[in-house]
């Protein structure tokens, strides 16, 4: 049920004390969305359950950030990221997302859990130019796979230069926390 809404360029906000929470299965289909998720995104719970989490993906988001996120959680690791999401009406909202794997009693990953909160505005001022650069790299390539690769290479170069870790995900997390 992916909506065909175009972005409105209108930003919406939510309260600092509110947390947006969602859970997905291994394929990224929503299995749970809390009231704050539904309220800010403008969907009824019945509209989102079973749908891809990407139902709220804003087209301005660089694919490289999602690739890094998926790589981390599929390896059973948590990750933090600034994400621009899109509401049902086409408005947008920013979050600082903390995405973790959900495990069963045997320790097997059975899905994913995401808590999102209001991001620091000064951090967003630093993220916006980076995300524009990455999106520009992605769109400059006729081949989407090549664009993603080039964008991910650039992201890894930037985050590695600003973080001391050698692991790409840890470098990205260090970069996010340095903002």
Image (cartoon, rainbow, N blue to C red):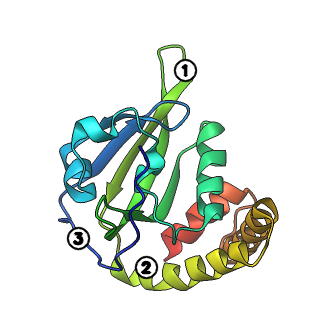
Among the two numbered marks 3 and 1 on one chain, the one whose residue lies closer to the N terminus = 3
Q: Nearer the viewer, residue 23 or 3?
A: 3
Which residue is rendered at x = 18% and y = 45% of the image? 35
Determine whether 143 is above or below 67 in the image.
below
Q: CA distance from mark 2 to mark 1?
A: 34 Å
Q: Nearer the viewer, residue 142 or 164?
A: 142
Residue hosting label 3: 13
Q: CA distance from mark 3 to mark 1?
A: 36 Å
Residue 1: % across, % down:
41, 43
Q: Label 3, secondary structure: give it.
A: loop
Discs 3/1, front: 3
Which residue is rendered at x = 35% and y = 49% of the image? 115
Tell me if mark 2 has few (under 14), some (14-19) or many (20+) residues whose alpha carbon lies within 10 angstroms of its own.
Answer: some
Q: Label 2, secondary structure: give it.
A: helix
Q: Label 1, secondary structure: give it.
A: loop
Mark 1 and mark 2 in contact (Cβ < 8 Å)?
no
Tell me if mark 1 has few (under 14), some (14-19) or many (20+) residues whose alpha carbon lies within 10 angstroms of its own.
Answer: few
Residue hosting label 2: 123
Drawn side of residue 155 relative to residue 22, left or right:
right
Determine whether 125 is above or below 74 in the image.
below
Among the two numbered marks 2 and 1 on one chain, the one whose residue lies closer to the N terminus = 1
Q: Nearer the viewer, residue 137 or 118?
A: 137
Name the image quarter holding residue 90: bottom left
Residue hosting label 1: 107
Residue 160: % across, % down:
72, 71
Q: Nearer the viewer, residue 157 or 42?
A: 42
Which residue is rendered at x = 33% and y = 40% of the image? 48
């Amino acid at each position: 049920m992916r909506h065909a809404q175009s972005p409105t360029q209108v930003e919406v906000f939510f309260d600092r004390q509110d947390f947006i929470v969602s859970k997905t299965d291994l394929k990224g289909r929503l299995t749970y969305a809390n009231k704050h998720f539904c309220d800010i995104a403008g969907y009824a719970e019945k509209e989102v359950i079973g749908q891809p989490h990407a139902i709220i993906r804003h087209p301005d988001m660089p694919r490289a950030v999602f690739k890094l996120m998926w790589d981390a959680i599929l390896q059973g690791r948590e990750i933090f990221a600034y994400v621009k999401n899109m509401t049902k009406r086409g408005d947008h909202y920013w979050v600082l997302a903390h995405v973790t794997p959900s495990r069963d009693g045997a320790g097997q990953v059975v899905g994913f859990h995401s808590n999102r909160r209001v991001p620091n505005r000064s951090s967003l001022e630093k993220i916006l130019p980076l995300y524009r650069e990455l999106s520009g790299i992605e769109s400059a390539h006729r081949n989407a796979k090549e664009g993603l690769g080039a964008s991910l290479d650039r992201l890894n170069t930037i985050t590695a230069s600003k973080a001391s870790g050698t692991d790409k995900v840890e470098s990205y997390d260090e970069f996010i926390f340095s903002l």
